[in-house]
Amino acid sequence: MPPGFVYLAAVSRPADFLTEVGWFTTEAWEPPLHLSAVLRSWEDRFGARLLQIGPAAEIRLLVSRPPQTEDAALAVAAELWAFGDTAWVTHSS
């Protein structure tokens, strides 16, 4: 694995990091404020925390309270699909 970088930003919630640093993936994506709003919702509902932003506009999250039923998982899958194909979710136990 290639070396990574650590970035620090003065934010009250991990989801606000993208907005604070002005992170864009491509011109086709929503502004960082919209991305942060989605991540804030996932923080509240699933305990999701921004873990890593990587090459090719990947966003990795650490999720402490994943959906517990198939219906809930399908609903989140629909959100992920609508959000974009670069959002990866890592489950923590």
Image: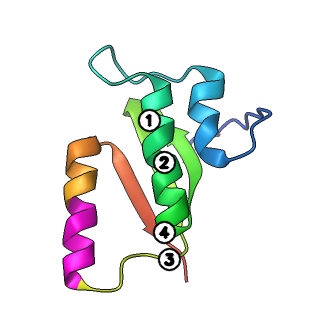
Q: 1 or 30: which is nearer to us?
A: 30
Can you tell which mark lies on residue 19?
none
The mark that comes first in sequence, 4 or 1, is: 1
**The disc labelled 1 sits on which kind of residue?**
Leu
Task: Give the x, y percent position of residue 79.
Answer: 26, 54
Q: For the residue labelled by badge 2, is the local secondary structure a helix, a strand or a loop?
A: helix
Q: Residue at x 40, y 24 (%)?
A: 25
Can you tell which mark lies on residue 65?
3
The mark that comes first in sequence, 2 or 3, is: 2
**The disc labelled 3 sits on which kind of residue?**
Arg
Q: Cα distance, mark 4 to mark 2?
A: 10 Å
Can you tell which mark lies on residue 39?
2
Q: Residue at x 73, y 33 (%)?
A: 7
Residue indicated by mark 1: 35
Task: Give the x, y percent position of residue 26.
Answer: 34, 18
Residues rendered magenta in the picture: 70-77
Q: Residue at x 36, y 48 (%)?
A: 87
**The disc labelled 4 sits on which kind of residue?**
Phe
Q: Cα distance, mark 2 to mark 3?
A: 14 Å
- Contact between labelled residues 4 and 3, with CB atoms less than 8 Å apart: yes
Q: Is residue 42 above or below residue 37?
A: below
**The disc labelled 2 sits on which kind of residue?**
Leu
The mark that comes first in sequence, 3 or 4, is: 4
- Contact between labelled residues 1 and 2, with CB atoms less than 8 Å apart: yes
